[in-house]
Image (spheres, rainbow, N blue to C red):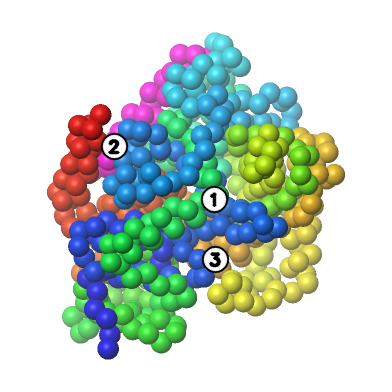
Amino acid sequence: MKKQYDILVIGSGLGGLVSALILAKEGLKVCVLEKNNQYGGNLQTFSRDKLIFDTGVHYLGGLSEGQNLHHFFSYLEIINDLELHKMDENGYDKITFEDDENEYPHAQGYENFVKQLSTYFPDEKENLENYCEEIQRVCNYFPRYNVVGQNNYNEEILHLNTKRFIESITANENLQAVLLGSNFLYAGDSENIPFYVHALTVNSYIQSSYKCVKGGSQISKLLIKKLREYGADVYKHSEVSEMIFNEDNTMTSVKTKQGKEYSAKQFISNIEIRSALKMIGESRLKKSFLNRVLSWEPVSSCFSVYIVLKPNTIANFNYNIYHFSSKDLVWNSFRYEKEKWPATYMLSSTPSKHHGEFAESLTAISYMDFEEVTEWENTFNTIADQSERDELYGKFKQEKADKMIDALEKKMTHIRDSIKSVYTSSPLSYRDYIGSYEGNMYGYIKASENPLKTMVSPRTKIENLFLTGQSVNMHGILGCTIGAFNTCAEILGREIIDERLTKMNNKKRCEK
């Protein structure tokens, strides 16, 4: 007999898990299906040499008391169980350039952000204050950024361009480069990307920055624990291969590769939008919508190098380093010449469990075009579905890892002597494990001249099918969380979601 659910969620990325939990808390019978061995999409971690490495989530913003992600995670009942470590308040990110010995800090707290950068740019204090005011102003125009309120997008804000905005803030090209220095967080095209993407991404980290102790997978584990407490069913190794519809185009059930069928009244797709459209079928969709989505350009993918260190050899640092071989690169850092790779990288460290002043591992990430791995694009390899790639692929990864270590050596001269072992992941790893198109990091490129082109409603033309996740909403922990609340507002009604969140906020205020 088929089990009947109120809501079935396809995919257990953050958007899917948050949507599932919001609805389970309302008493609905919920089921989540995940194809992989591990839940969580970009929240997945892996273990090597008894150490945990993050694949996607390296730090979180907006998690201090009273801030937006703290409110959302409070509503989801996971905030008190998260193991968090606050990053360096005077520089959670440090921006560095090959031809400049300074390490420019992005500090926590708006006043502190201005204060720390004013040390390097004493004549720019007022401009830095304006920058902080403007990113807050732009964020306030976005639905649910402040948890409740602001239900529509402001068209004028959507068209603001990052390059033009940064140039209007300051004429100092060094400061422009420093303010854009963490653009790896939205994949780098600061020339064409809307300013709201920059603002929404960096604002939360300026408010507060934390690392997840033992990796980002604790978020998905806590959400799944809560889902089960609310009676939801959550299954892995359950890849949805077919969506089934009745004669009036209503979705009735899904079938998995494993041959099981699951029925529900309503469905949420948290998988890559192209994969979802393929299963829905072209005939059920407007040609114009289909063409629009298929014309989207994916954000760049990346290549990651995970370095296990010999004990007590490299000092731990409680911040991320964003390094550029030149200041010009900040405008479109994902464009690179193969022979000069890596022209930019993000570097983070994890403290040793026994000697916290030393690092036990490093993670270095740089952009990589999917075309670099097209030779192996017809191969597929995950824990749930294992197959080996050839020797050439192993050689390719080894060469890239060596190039990354060469680049790191310019900053950390004795790094090679400190390395115990090295592991890597390529765009194929991100494609296979996370399901993102061509292994993209953050969905699809947004452009300021046509911001509505890549904006999709959570509600589809199929009456009982809804969308969530980074390929249809903003990316990142906050973006996917807000997107999930917006998806659930379409299902439950905006008033119910607003009422629940307002009630929680009022309760917290009373408790104080």
Residue 255, percent from left and from top: 36, 82
Q: Mark 1 points at which residue?
A: 215
Q: 3 or 424, which is in the foreground?
A: 3
Q: Are marks 2 and 3 in contact (CB under 8 Å)?
A: no
Q: Is residue 241 above or below residue 84?
A: below
Q: What element carries label 2?
A: loop
- Answer whether residue 352 is magenta in the image: no
Give the answer, above or below, for where 170 lies relative to 54: above
Of label 1 and label 3, which has the lower sequence position? 1
Three-letter amino acid code at the position of disc 1? Gly
Q: Nearer the viewer, mark 2 or mark 1?
A: 1
> Residue 130: within the magenta?
yes
Residue at disc 1, secondary structure: loop
Mark 2, residue position = 146
Going by the numbered disc 3, the residue's amino acid type is: Tyr
> As rendered, which of 336 and 306 lies closer to the eye?
306
Q: At x 38% / y 60%, what residue is drawn? A: 225
What residue is drawn where x is 49% and y is 41%?
84
Range of residues picked out in magenta: 124-153
* Disc 2 to disc 1, C-alpha distance: 27 Å
Q: Residue 177 at what x, y percent from top left?
A: 59, 29
Q: Nearer the viewer, residue 283 or 484?
A: 484
For label 3, the residue is: 433
Q: In this view, does 413 lie to the left or right of 259?
A: right
Image quarter for residue 72? top left
Secondary structure at badge 3 equals helix
* Mark 2 Cα-neighbour bin, 10 Å: few <14, some 14–19, many ≥20: some
